[in-house]
Amino acid sequence: MKPKEISEFSDTALLIVWDDGHESIYIYEDLRQSCPCASCDELRKSSKIGREGKLPFKRIIPMGTSLQKVEIKPDRMDPVGLYALRFKWNDGHETGIYSFDFLRKLCMCEKCQPA
Ligand SMILES: [Zn+2]
Ligand SMILES: [Zn+2]
């Protein structure tokens, strides 16, 4: 399973069109919360907030931005080999490598996550 197309769906979400034609929309904040790296994994396991599914990550807020506008977003996305994407988030975190298999499992559409 590989992305055929990766594009910005909105200011807060990413669209991936897969090679089987499936379309997945990912909210950046959810992607950040799901970061698969070891340190985020530790945070999720060790913190109370983490157990409720949210990472207590810090956001770097650029001077002069109004607080309502601060949203977690990737500053950049880089391919890792032919199997994954690496996000550099605007909170400075960049150790998470999101394999395509992992991303596909994160898809929140009705087909992938039946109620
Ligand atoms: Zn991480
Ligand atoms: Zn899906």
Image (cartoon, helix red, strand yellow):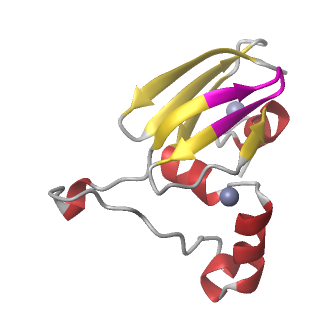
Name the quarter showing ligand 2. top right
Q: Is residue 104 above or below residue 19?
A: below
52 vs 70, nearest the viewer = 70
Kindly report the secondary structure that dominates the magenta region of the rendered protein.
strand
Disc count in the image? 0
- Residue depicted at 83% across the width and 20% down the height: 82
Q: Is residue 82 above or below residue 45?
A: above
Can residue 35 be seen?
yes
Residue 18 in which image quadrant: top right
Question: Quarter-wise, where is residue 68 in the image?
Answer: bottom left
Q: Residue furthest bottom?
A: 48
Residue 1 highlighted magenta (yes or no): no
Asked if residue 60 lies left or right of residue 57, the reply is left
Q: Position of residue 50 (x, y in %)?
A: 66, 77
Q: Is residue 84 magenta?
A: yes
- Give the side of residue 49 with respect to residue 105, left or right: left
**In this picture, which residue range is highlighted in magenta?**
78-86
Q: Position of residue 106 (x, y in %)?
A: 72, 44
